[in-house]
Structure formats: C-alpha cells, structure tokens
Image (tube, helix red, strand yellow):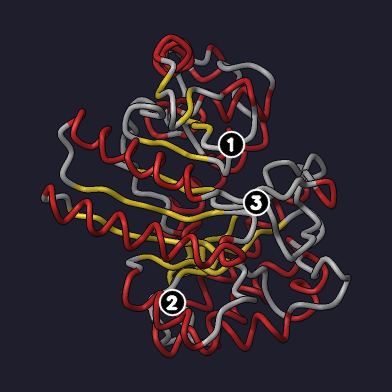
Amino acid sequence: MLGVFWITTDCNMNCVYCYEGNNKKKFYMNRTIIKEAIDFLIDKMLEIDDEKLTIDFHGGEPFLAYDSICEIVENVKQKCHKIGINVRFGCTTNATLLNFLRLKFVVENFDDFTISMDGAKSTQNYSRPFKTGKETHAVVEKCLKETLKVIPNLRVRMTFNHLTVNDFYDNIKYFGDMGVKYVVPTRDFYDRDFGENEFIKLKQQLFLVNEYIENSNNKLHVSMLEKFPLKKLGKCSGGIDSFHIDPNGNIYPCALSVGNENFLIGNVNKGINIKKRDALLKYSVRDNASCLGCDLHDYCEQTRCKIVNKILAGAFCTPSAIACTENRMLYDISTNLKE
C-alpha cells in the first residue's frame, strides 16, 4: 500500500512550470493531522490485509517540514513494528535544505531518495530559481555531489519543457558525467507549447543519450529509454491501496489530483467517501473510444489513468494527445533500439 504525505505546500523555489506560481498558499501538516493520517493508513493496511507499506514525502519542499518528517518516520516505524508490517520510506526534494545531519537521517531511514534538478547551469537556473530570484544551480549541484557520496543509487527527476528540450542530451550527460545512475526525465504535463516539432527534437536527443550510454562506463539508467518492454497495466487502485494526503488531511487518489476538489475522496478524520471514490474508479475500466485497436491499449497510462485524462484533456475517456504522442514515440524508440 502507498501513503503519500504532502507534508507542506510551501516551497523555497519558484519553478517556471509550477502552475500555482507565487500564489501558492503555505500550509503545513500539524501534529493532529499527522497522528490522524498515520492512524488512517495503519487501519487501511489492516483492512486490506497488506503487509508492505510505502510512505513517501512530497511538497512543496518537504524538508521545510523536516521535524514533521522525523516525527512521521519514528511513529510509523513503531506502529508497523508492533503489527508486523514492513515499511519503506521515500522522498522527493529540491536538495537545497540538505545538510550533514539531514543526510544522515535520510541514509538511516529512507529506501528511495529523489532529487529534483533539471540539468546543467543554464537549464537549472532558468527552470528552478529561488523565490528571491537567485540562481540555484551551484547550491543544488553541491548538495547532489555530497548526496551521491552516501546514496550512490539516488534518482534525479529532470523536468523539461518546449524551451529546454534542445538541451535534453546535454543535461542527461551532465548527470551521467557526475556519476548519477538513475535519471527520470519528466515532460512538463501542462506545457501546451510542446508539439510535434518538440517531439522530433526529443526523439533525436534520446538517440544521442542512448549512444552516450552505450559508449560510456557509468551504468546510467534513463527511464524514458527503459519504459518498454511492455507490461500490462492493471486498473486504477486510487483510494483502495493508494492515498495522497495533503497538509489539511484531505485524501486524493493520485499525485496529479492533489488539491483538486473534484477528486477529493475523503479526510483522515472522517475516512474515505466510498461513493465518490467508486464513482471515480468506475471510469478506470471504461475504454477510451479513440484508443480501441491501438496495439498499446493494454500498456498505456492513458488507458488506465482516467483522472489524468480528465485533468489534461477535459474528459475521463479522452486521452491527452500530447501524452499519446509521447508514449507512441517511446515505444518506437524502444523497438528501434532493440533492432
């Protein structure tokens, strides 16, 4: 089971692709909500008779609420130990607030650790400046290098858009040369200007990345080049064994839905609104008419993730054209590389 603590909406950066921008309200999860959230997740674990719990921390910037993270980790460990549940912890951070003691805590407690950084100096400073307008590259690069010394298998999440796609290869190489082993490139979902020309550029860049990996000895893994072979996707389980909890204790089924009242399915104090959850889940098993006959039908997120469809395309059973293009492109690349 997955429980995600969106521990705060506050952030010390002003990323160009943050749809809330400077108007984001600053909420922090208080101790009452923390206790109720932990109790809710433990009760759900017992209810569905699951023995493995994954706890992730997101934000905002989660390390702005470092003390709350420590409290949650300590309490969850104690409760899971008492009832024989295996628990794993993970976190995604912009790395600017890491220090020796916090890294020590991460090493001792976290199984998965992701740093959000968009690439070399020009890209990072453009995409992810501090709220003050100051550049972030030097700070994050230093933290990333220090973190790699103690967490060599950390992941880097690299967001790109239509303006930075031209530097995709250079930014991947930047991470590879630094010794990063896992890079997860993520297209900005809300970038309406990412069109056909950008996908042509992205495809060219990915082939360059693959050539770089084949000719180097750094064992770099880039998720976009490893999306296939195909694996069948099951139906959505949001609200059944996946719970995203915001600072106010509100529960959402998945990451993209957090903060959207249309997908609010409960609260840690009152529990899950079964009627509303099931009303959303029913769309998961419905076919997208435009996807029928597609050879990727059973393997594509747009077939499974109807909430994503609704948010990006306006209808549960209408896939995002941009996302569809991306999946087809990645499949074609995977096929070509195998040949």
Mark 3 vs 1, N-terminal side? 3
Q: Secondary structure at mark 1?
A: loop
Q: Quadrant of the C terminus?
A: bottom left
Mark 2 vs 1, N-terminal side? 2
In the rendered view, would you say 120 is above or below 255? Answer: below
Q: Which mark is residue 181?
A: 2
Which quadrant would residue 175 be assigned to in this image?
bottom right
Q: Which mark is residue 258?
A: 1
* Residue in the picture at 64% in, 29% down: 260
* C-alpha separation, residue under disc 2 versus residue under disc 1: 30 Å
User: In the current view of this chain or complex, which residue is farthest to the right?
Assistant: 133
Amino acid, disc 1: Val
Q: Secondary structure at mark 2?
A: loop
Position of 12 compared to 40: left or right? Answer: right
In the rendered view, would you say 51 is above or below 182? Answer: above
- x, y percent for residue 262: 62, 20
Amino acid, disc 2: Lys
Position of 59 compared to 278: left or right? Answer: right
* Residue in the picture at 79% in, 61% down: 14
Residue matched to label 3: 187
In the rendered view, would you say 206 is above or below 283? Answer: below
* Residue in the picture at 76% in, 66% down: 128
Neighbor class of circle 3 (other Cα within 10 Å; few <14, some 14-19, many 20+) is some
- x, y percent for residue 115: 54, 69
